[in-house]
Image (cartoon, grey):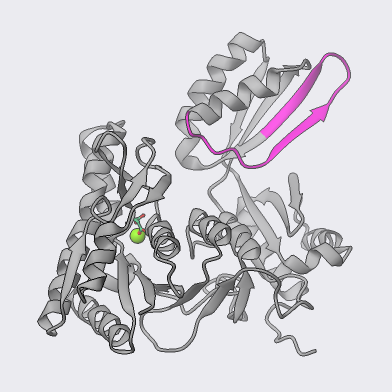
Amino acid sequence: MQVLVQKYGGSSVADTQKIKAVARRIISAKNSGYHVVAVVSAQGDTTDELVAKAREISSSPSKREMDMLLSTGEQISIALLAMAIAEEGYPVISLTGPQGGICTDALHTRAKILRVDPVRVRKELSDGRIVIVAGFQGINDMGDITTLGRGGSDTTAVALAAALDAKACEIYTDVDGVYTADPRLVSSARKLDEISHGEMLELASLGAAILQPRAVELAAAWGVTIHVRSSFSDSLGTMVIGGDLMEKQRVVSGVTRDLNVVKVMLVDVPDRPGVAHSIFSTLAQKGINVDMIVQTTKQGPVTDLLFSIGQDDYPATKRLIEELAKDLGITQVLFSERLAKVSIVGAGMMSNPGVAATMFGILAEHGINIEVISTSEIKVSCLIEASKVDEAVKAIHDGFRLGEEITA
Ligand code: ASP
Ligand code: MG
C-alpha cells in the first residue's frame, strides 16, 4: 500500500471543529487506500503565545529550554487529533518527532534534520494504524528535544515523505495554493496550478510565507512532489514539482515582498584577503543567515561592505559586528530597518533577456528608488523603502500582467 503524507498547519487545527474536520479528511484518505501519515503543527497561535510566555520570564532564554517549551504546542495537537480519529472508530496513534525518528543536529531552535529513522512509523502503518506525527520537532544525539525553526512542520512532512517513499506530500493550509502575489495585497493575484521546486524555493525564501524554504529544498533534493492546498475545501491547489515546467512560456511566476530586512553597512573595511571571510564566518558560526551581500570598491585601501539579515538576528549581529569592527579597524557600522525587499521569480527568466530591466522600469515609473539589487538565474530582488513595498508589488504584478491566464 502506498504512503501518503499530509501536513496540517496551525490554522487548520485551531479549534475542536477544525480538528474534527481534519480527522475526517485523514480518514477519507485512509479509506481511499493509503497508509496515511499526518504531520501537524501547533494549534493557531500557540507557538507565538509560548514565545511570549518565555519572554515574560527572560529576554534571552536558553535555546534548549525554548525547544522544550515550543515542542509542547505540537504535542497538544497530535494527541487531540488522534483522539478525534479514534472517536470515528479508526485505529490511530500519535508520535512525537523523536518517536517518529526525526534525528537532528544540536542547533537548538533551528535544528537541521540529519536523518529520518521511521521504523516505528512503518510498524504502526503496517499494523493498520493512521500515524499522526508532531511537526517541527526532533531529537539530537544527546537525546534532547530540538525544533526546526518557525514553520518547521513543513520540513518534518517532506522529510517523512522522502523517508517513506510517499506518493506525495500534501500540505494543507488556510490558502488554496501558491499565488502570483499575496492575494490579500493584490486583488488580481492568480493561483498557479504548478510551479517548479526551484521557483518555489525562491518564492518561499523571498517572503511568500506559504512553505518553509528548507522544506522545499528537501523536496527538491529528494524529488518529493508537494501539493499545497486548502484544508477548508476539496479543490486542487498548486503542485510543486521537479524538473521542467509545462508552462514554459511564463517568464515571471510571482512577485513577493519581505519586510523582515535589516541592512548592515560597514564603512571603510580594510581591503585585504581574509577580511570578508572573518566577518561572514563569524556570523555563520552563530547560525546567522546573511542574505544579500554587496561590496563596493573605493579609492584607497578600503571598501564598503553592505549585507542584509533578518530582524531576529539583529541583536546578535550587532554585538558580533561591533566587536569585529574594533578588531579589524572598520571605521563605521550602520544598521537600518527602513528597507524591504521586493522580488520577482520565474524559471523563464533564464531564456528571456530584459526581465530585470522591465522590473527596474516599473519601479522608476512609480518613483521608487532601488538601494540594493541582487539576482540569481531565476529571480531579481531589490531593496527599496519599506513604505513603498506594497505599491511596488502591485505595480510589478500589473506590469508583468501576472493576473492574466497564459494562453499559448
Ligand atoms: N508551530 C511552529 C510554528 O508556528 C511550526 C509550524 O507551524 O510549522 O512555527
Ligand atoms: Mg504555525
Q: Which residues are magenta?
A: 286-306
Within the magenta stretch, is there residue 337?
Answer: no
Q: Quadrant of the C terminus?
A: bottom right
Q: Position of residue 232 (x, y in %)?
A: 36, 83
Q: Position of residue 286 (x, y in %)?
A: 47, 29
At 57% from the left and 54% from the top, the residue drawn is 205
At 40% from the left and 89% from the top, the residue drawn is 234
On the question of residue 14 being in view, the answer is no
- Tell whether 67 sits left or right of 288: left
Q: Nearer the viewer, residue 19 or 155?
A: 155
On the question of residue 276 being in view, the answer is yes
In the image, ligand 1 is in what quadrant?
A: bottom left
Q: Position of residue 181 (x, y in %)?
A: 60, 71
Q: Nearer the viewer, residue 302 or 160?
A: 160
Within the magenta stretch, is there residue 289?
Answer: yes
- Tell whether 309 sits left or right of 118: right
- How many discs appear? 0
Name the quadrant containing residue 295.
top right
At 25% from the left and 72% from the top, the residue drawn is 126
Q: Nearer the viewer, residue 249 or 263?
A: 249
Q: Nearer the viewer, residue 355 or 383?
A: 355
- Tell whether 64 sits left or right of 92: right
Q: Position of residue 1 (x, y in %)?
A: 35, 80
Q: In this rendering, is residue 254 above or below 229?
A: above
At 55% from the left and 52% from the top, the residue drawn is 259
- Tell whether 176 sits left or right of 304: left
Q: In this rendering, is residue 297 above or below 22?
A: above
